[in-house]
Image (cartoon, rainbow, N blue to C red):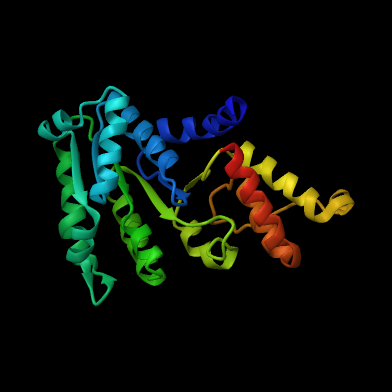
Amino acid sequence: MQQANAALYGFEQEVLTCAGPAAHMVQLYESDDRLLVRNAGRYFAEGFGRGDRGLIVTTEERAEAFRREFGRLGIDAAAAVRDERLTFFDSHQTLARILVDGYPDAARFDEIVGAALRRLVASNESGALRAYGDMVGTLWTARQFPSAIRLEQLWGKLLAQVPFSLFCAYSIDLFGTDFEAGVVDALLCAHSHFLPAGSNATLQSALGRAMEDVLGAKVASLPAVKLERRPAWPELPRAESLILWLKKNLRDQAGDIFVRARQYYQETA
């Protein structure tokens, strides 16, 4: 696992530590959000080290996980909140305030989230801010896809107006039907960086083993995997690209491949 983690962290370290204004990152996760919490912790820890302010919009359960991760990294979250270096918003309460008939209202979003961002930026000498939000993921999980994308667009508008970076999270099963090019197209187009959902080297190895199990000698005769991705998409990690390619080009065998790949991946993750 050490080599796999190194392969994972090489890409993530650069993105998470060097996230500048207007960077808009997204990470997918399943029921296990430990890697998400670790990545978000590193993202904010790097920002605090540079004097950035932080805004976290999440559930109370995940906020507690973030606080524990901050503690593991030597960051006193309670002190950061007292000093107004860090602000927590409850994602369910915030959604209730910005939704009108189930759809994000631009004026309400700006009055609540936009105002908080501008206040945090104005109170910081460096003017730098890092934000995390999973309201979009909550809407996506509820299958309110147009509302989730509209909320991404409102975040994007703020990114163009206020100097901050944003880390988003969605609970999406890479092997399931929600992770297909046509389904996640708008989601991908809304972001500048796509973080691996897990150890990409381990995930890619699991996919390779599963393909050999299901396809046998036919694996050698497969055409080169080249995902037809839109220019508006961020660069995708190799494993995620392979999953999309399999769903498009080997639909009849993809289900069996994913069943085995999930098993292999869970054994080593």
Q: Is residue 66 left or right of residue 169?
A: left
Q: Is residue 36 visible?
A: yes
Residue 53: percent from left, percent from top: 22, 35
21 up-or-down from 169: above or below: above
Toward which corner of the image does residue 46 lie, by quadrant? top left
Residue at far left of view: 82
198 up-or-down from 1: above or below: below
Q: Is residue 81 left or right of residue 200?
A: left
Kindly identify the residue that appears in the image at 11 percent across and 31 percent down. 83
Kindly identify the residue that appears in the image at 25 percent across and 35 percent down. 67
Residue 260: percent from left, percent from top: 68, 52
Toward which corner of the image does residue 230 lie, by quadrant? bottom right
Image quarter in which the N terminus is found: top right
Kindly identify the residue that appears in the image at 43 percent across and 55 percent down. 171
Q: Is residue 228 visible?
A: no
Q: Relative to the observer, which residue lies in front, 88 or 155?
A: 88
Q: Is residue 253 left or right of residue 178?
A: right
Image quarter in which the C terminus is found: top right
Q: Relative to the observer, which residue lies in front, 137 or 129?
A: 137
Count of numbered circles in the view:
0
12 up-or-down from 92: above or below: above
Q: Relative to the observer, which residue lies in front, 125 or 16?
A: 16
Residue 60: percent from left, percent from top: 23, 48
